[in-house]
Image: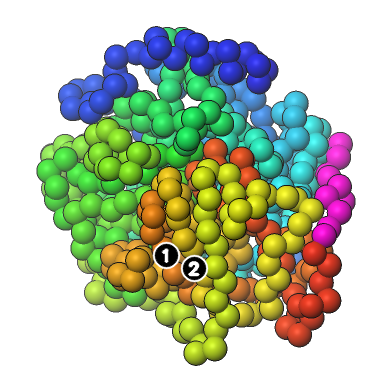
Amino acid sequence: MNRRQFLAAVALSGFASACGSGAMSDPAAFRTELRVPPLLVPKVDKDGTRRFALTMQRGRSEILPGKPVETWGFNGPHLGPTIRVARGDRVRMAVTNRLDEASTVHWHGMRLPAKMDGGPHQMIEPGGTWSPHWTIDQPAATSWYHPHPHGATAEHVYRGLAGMFIIDDPAETELPAKYGIDDVPLILQDKNLAEDGSPTGDPLDGTFGILGEHMLVNGTHAPFLNVRTERVRFRILNGSNARMYHLAFADRRAFHVVGGDAGLLPAPVQVEQVSLTPGERVEVVAAFTAGEQVLLRTLSGSDDIDEGDFDLLKIVAAPRLAASPRLPSRLAGAPAPIAVPPNARVRRFQLNGHDAINRKEMDLSRIDEVVPAGATEIWEIENTVYAHNFHIHEVAFQVLDVDGEKPPAYGSGHKDTVYVPPKSTVRLAVRFGRFTDPATPYMYHCHILRHEDSGMMGQFVIVEPGTENQVPRTIATDHAHHGA
Ligand code: C2O
Ligand code: CU
Ligand code: CU
């Protein structure tokens, strides 16, 4: 299906099947076993470098059971394998584009040189392969990867290109970590589906793009998960184009948040509900009792991107559960708080409408901000009207306050993406990295993909301290295409 046909399919969206509308409160409807993305096995070179190969491709998969439709994926028809690495690993990726249009792959949450980041300046032409490499040097975290071609990110992600990227840290030892058993990835996405089961809707339409009425977890519609241990760690990624989730169990049981986007929290935080905007991740540990069943759901909110109660996943606990390690009261491996120096530079960003920051639309040839390597700065994000969030590449930040109020404890750790409610101001303490490159920018943007694609994005470079004023503010935009 080409783009025009894809958009034409919008007309069919009125035929969406009944099972998708509103809360799916009949637990018996959850009949498909949750797919768990396979772990991507690297080839290990003599010098220890781990080589991972990803191929972007089209394929067919069943979003609704029995209805195969075209989807896009990495190394398979839909979504991508989970990459798992440890701090200190040297990694080398080979990303091949087997689509018939150019794309990129961005490592969201990774701290790496700008040339390796996979933003809109690292385009991969059809048939081409891009081979970034870097050393993993950041705390344990749940990151992810997805395309980032300017103007088409929303469509490429909506078609199915996204995967999880887990970083382990030898310092972190006490949490469940058996992948697919008691350490389970949950990629949350919403879609509108035509009667034939194919995704419909224009991801660049309306104020927010797609707000689907069918919920998918790891690409599985109405899934169940068999659990066999007393406690399970869920690594939850909001991989949706626009939807914000307010996650809770149907019985409102308490669970613990142990980590956010960019690392573990210093201590588990008990909650009954946790909110997640597009691009954000949260790690939680939940306890189950033998033989029970419980639904994980999202609750309706009032900010336009969170309308509707939807059940997401049925958890089915085995009649006997294996004992789990106790949840530690302090989490080893959590990154230290970001200290803000008294003279920290403050930069202000205003989110305008749905397509501009500081009244400017994204321009690939314009450097908006120049940051000295290793800086800690305060970034103040002011929102004017619609719901937005804010993501910064390469960095870790902590939320200082939202309209002067502290963030909830579960959202106070290291992050890279944050919700910016309508008409509010969020202040961030941002720690920048040390990879310098005055000619290759990193991005900051709203992660509602319709907004990102429309121009609510800016570019910054990291440079040697003291050279900020020598940096050209205009760059060539055709220098980094990785052709066939
Ligand atoms: Cu997940 Cu610039 O993006
Ligand atoms: Cu990113
Ligand atoms: Cu936005």
Query: For the stretch drawn in magenta, what is the main secondary structure?
Result: loop
**Which percent across, then down, holds residue 194?**
45, 14
13 is higher (above) or lower (below) than 235? above
Residue appearing at x 71%, y 38% in the figure: 103
Query: Is disc 1 surrounded by few (<14), some (14 to 19) or many (20+) residues within 10 Å?
Result: many
Residues in magenta? 474-484
Q: How far apart are the two marked residues, 2 and 1, measured between alpha carbons? A: 6 Å
Res 461 visible: yes
What kind of colouring is applied to the model shown? rainbow
Query: Is disc 2 surrounded by few (<14), some (14 to 19) or many (20+) residues within 10 Å?
Result: many
**Is the residue under label 1 in contact with that under label 2 (CB below 8 Å)?**
yes
**Which percent across, then down, holds residue 312?**
30, 35
Amino acid type, mark 1? Val
198 is higher (above) or lower (below) than 230? above
Task: Tell me if residue 315 is in the magenta stretch.
Answer: no
Residue appearing at x 68%, y 59% in the figure: 459
Amino acid type, mark 2? Glu
Mark 2 = which residue? 380
Give whichever of 227, 244 is nearer the camera: 244
Mark 1 = which residue? 426
Quarter-wise, where is residue 79 in the image? top right
Q: Earlier in the sequence, mark 2 or mark 1?
A: 2
